[in-house]
Image (tube, coloured by chain):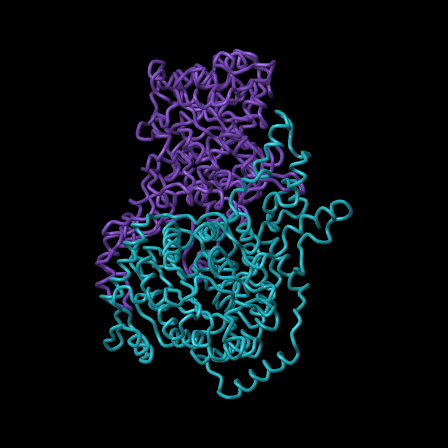
Chain colours: A cyan, B purple
């Protein structure tokens, strides 16, 4: 199913067959299914307190709607109190609007139906990182991203064995004018991949273009029924939503498409420093955003998102891999389950500038919490560097590999007869190894998660192979993947229609960098 | 309290005072206290199944006792069935022996009473890595360890802000004869640190020497009452214990000292490949080892240990940071709670040869599980590289730093009035940042876990400071710590008595490398 295999071609005869058998266990799943119960870090009573406090915030402070009187009217029409730009919500209003129509779970259809994803419990969809203006790799160091980089990350995501969704702004193609980037980004997702993807949200008209391009691929009639494109809106925390975000949300929701509603909180700056307060504010802001979509079009799918980071109290810089944001993540996942909508948070986060020890440690801590909390849609699974300012080619490969462990982890402990293995335990005898035992051989293909980037060889073997560190090995891996990439097929008529749409729209207004 | 501060001396005036205030929050705690409930991955019914299966193993297969007829007799005296080297246990015998006398929790006293540690729920004691014949650092690469390296790791542990216990064989001083290394190792722990520590277990006579040296420091009378030294015994999995291990266990237990009983299992080799089977076998082997100590001396403290790694099914090499060993860890922590003894497992494990992305990712995954599972004594918290074959100087610094996050994590979510921060949330207003809010200022010193090795600066600042990766920054840190090290005081009479004991014992038998 995938087009590359780092180890392919290096083995012969018996070991080649063995490698092939092992590779079968690595086939891409369209998404993961959780058997392990999510980790809970606070009591039901604690969650109720946070819900109560969020309602107090919505009732007393309310949400400021910046430059978007129409959104104030939309909220008012559903029972909110409007006072100029400020909208206040009677207790429970947002929750009841969401509960009345937002789906607990839904399918985002991909161009290749085999790659459609189900978003909601008990599933987990892994998605590459989003929004970086820079790229980093060992050859170039750090530099501004281009549309060619964007295409490369589409291709790496398309050929990934562990990611499930194409993502959105895989990097910012800063070589293109700001107001026309979205055409090339959406086109790249459609043309160079067949996975589900995300459209633009930097202006409502660009959100609308994204939806129109999806209509060319999926058909207008089908899009009234099926969800095929997603937008991501971030609140202007604290307690504020603006025209670009809610206007884009309206474009997606009114077309029955998916909105990911994510307060983006740097604790201590956009919210108080404590875990409970960050969870409270995130819940309040997200409730308002999700309710907005349900008022615009009841039943349009929404995802409750959270992005929370800590910060250095000395410099104000965002910090990652610290314990507080993981606790925020666990709390919000539990709140999303109580609300009954899919949850997005987490990823492989770091403040490091390169794929070093810091980058990996911070990423792994964040990702362990992501795996455990019950996240349904994991934006930022692979590539994130430098607090999101850069996406790394090596980082992408390394994260993409490690995130595969979630497939095993979320399955939990197998207590079947084979899992208990009492036949093996009672017949093997003291002091004898299990390497050749029938139970071991029976489980050979699926036993133990296998990383493709980790080196587990002896020191001497490793040295003989060049003594490379993980990032250096990853350089070879991403180059090989891009070299071997083959585009998925596309209906030539659809391709032509897309290119025609883009050409017409680009000609309709001048380039601009705002 | 600690003698070094990486950032000390680089700040002036206001920022120096700020740094000092922040540093207060970094003072060493003698050990951590958990408020967060441990993570559970299987049901009570599942745990009962594993307990039942372990009893079946002990009853039907039993334990082979290699080269130690006296241990067979000891087991027989308590009700086990002996058949040559094989000892079989009636269902429930081991558990009832342990329940009858093993403490749920106990104190290991340090030479400096302020550094004594409580081992058992709800506490967590962090301990450096154990047993590596090689060291690694960026200057030397990888080479055999010496007694000078051993002393360096004693000093780094003594000056650590986040580790709580001195550990044992911090590295193997392979420049000394095998049969006399223990004298210098135990002496180094006593002389260059004042933390609690572990003695030798490579032969019962060396265990006895370790206990005798502790008697010189703490007094024979006190040692009948207090626990001041610990030994670590690994089973010869599957289902076998030998003379060196049980003989050493007898030396410690009969002196009322602490035994850490740890089956060391490479899944697929020393046990079947499945999680449940590895947990079952670990429980059976540990039950036998802990019961042995309770027969030798009822009430002598024991710790239920588990070391479980996965392996590469292609090469047989041990692998780390994979999901299966984390699941084993969670299951065994739960089994230890049910048994009612302290639990040891986890650490910062990796198969990587150097402190790179692989090393950090694997370590962090292992350590997150360690933090969450309810581990009470965490051997291998800092330094581990190359599957334990090497201890890294930079790895030690990086792990030691990251492991500090457990202090925050295990406290869980603060739902106090200050934690809820409703005053801040309701008075701040939409769109305004919280940087200068009274709530933020009130929580300034304790808000957010602070890593001392992570770089959170801007790319430009980071580049200006040399563009170093985390490992390179850690090189400067360990060198500075060692350069600034000052030994704790010791009673000259005690020191003289120790040196005299060592000189007499060393002269009593020839050097040997077995």
Residue B121 pos. (x, y %): 36, 33
Picture mark count: 0
Query: Residue B285, can we see it?
Result: no
Q: Is A77 in front, or is A148?
A: A77
Compared to residue A20, the image places residue B373 above or below, namely above
Furthest residue to the right? A13
Query: Residue B292, can we see it?
Result: yes
Q: Is residue A155 left or right of residue B479?
A: right
Compared to residue A492, the image places residue A462 above or below, namely above
Q: Is B190 in front, or is B120?
A: B120
Residue B268 pos. (x, y %): 62, 36
Which image quarter: residue B99? top left
Residue shown at the point (40%, 32%) measured from the top left? B165
Q: Quadrant of the C terminus of chain A?
A: bottom left
Q: Quadrant of the N terminus of chain A?
A: bottom right
Compared to residue A183, the image places residue A16 above or below, namely above
Furthest residue to the front? A100
Q: Is residue A103 left or right of residue A44?
A: right
Q: Is B484 in front, or is B128?
A: B128
Residue shown at the point (46%, 64%) measured from the top left? A389
Compared to residue B436, the image places residue B394 above or below, namely above
Residue A357 pos. (x, y %): 50, 49
Residue shown at the point (36%, 35%) measured from the top left? B123
Furthest residue to the bottom? A508
Residue B208 pos. (x, y %): 47, 16
């Amino acid at each position: 199913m995938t087009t590359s295999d780092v180890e392919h071609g290096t083995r012969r005869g018996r070991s080649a067959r063995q490698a092939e058998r092992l590779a079968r266990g690595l086939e891409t799943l369209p998404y993961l299914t959780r058997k392990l119960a999510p980790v809970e870090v606070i009591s039901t009573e604690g969650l109720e307190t946070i819900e109560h406090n969020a309602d107090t915030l919505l009732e007393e402070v309310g949400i400021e709607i910046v430059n978007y009187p129409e959104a104030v009217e939309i909220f008012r029409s559903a029972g909110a109190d409007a006072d100029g730009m400020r909208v206040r919500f009677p207790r429970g209003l947002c929750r009841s609007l969401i509960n009345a129509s937002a789906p607990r779970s839904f399918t985002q259809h991909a161009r290749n139906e085999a790659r459609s994803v189900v978003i909601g419990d008990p599933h987990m969809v892994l998605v590459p990182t989003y929004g970086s203006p820079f790229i980093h790799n060992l050859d170039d160091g750090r530099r501004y991203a281009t549309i060619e980089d964007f295409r490369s990350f589409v291709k790496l995501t398309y050929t990934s064995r562990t990611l499930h969704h194409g993502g959105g702004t895989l990097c910012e193609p800063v070589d293109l004018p700001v107001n026309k980037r979205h055409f090339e980004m959406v086109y790249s997702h459609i043309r160079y991949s067949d996975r589900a993807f995300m459209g633009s949200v930097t202006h409502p008209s660009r959100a609308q273009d994204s939806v129109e391009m999806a209509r060319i691929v999926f058909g207008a009639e089908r899009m009234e029924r099926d969800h095929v494109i997603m937008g991501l809106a971030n609140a202007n925390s604290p307690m504020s939503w603006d025209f670009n975000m809610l206007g884009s949300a309206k474009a997606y929701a009114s077309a029955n498409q998916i909105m990911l509603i994510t307060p983006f909180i740097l604790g201590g700056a956009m919210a108080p420093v404590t875990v409970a307060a960050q969870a409270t504010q995130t819940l309040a802001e997200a409730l308002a955003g999700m309710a907005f979509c349900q008022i615009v079009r009841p039943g349009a799918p929404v995802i409750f998102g959270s992005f929370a980071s800590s910060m250095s109290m000395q410099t104000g810089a965002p910090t990652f891999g610290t314990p507080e944001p993981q606790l925020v993540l666990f709390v919000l996942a539990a709140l999303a389950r109580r609300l009954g909508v899919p949850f997005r948070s987490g990823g492989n986060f770091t403040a490091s500038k390169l794929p070093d020890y810091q980058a990996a440690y911070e990423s792994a801590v964040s990702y362990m919490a992501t795996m455990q909390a019950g996240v349904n849609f994991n934006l930022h699974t692979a590539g994130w560097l430098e607090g999101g300012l850069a996406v790394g080619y090596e980082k992408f490969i390394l994260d993409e590999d490690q995130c595969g462990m979630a497939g095993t982890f979320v399955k939990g402990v197998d207590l079947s007869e084979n899992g208990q293995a009492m036949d093996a335990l009672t017949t093997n005898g003291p002091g004898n190894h299990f390497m050749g035992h029938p139970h071991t051989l029976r489980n050979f293909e699926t036993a133990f998660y296998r990383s493709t980037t980790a080196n587990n060889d002896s020191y001497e073997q490793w040295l003989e192979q060049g003594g490379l560190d993980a990032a250096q090995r990853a350089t070879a891996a991403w180059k090989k993947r891009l070299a071997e990439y083959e585009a998925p097929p596309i209906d030539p008529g659809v391709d032509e229609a897309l290119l025609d749409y883009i050409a017409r729209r680009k000609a309709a207004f001048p380039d601009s960098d705002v």
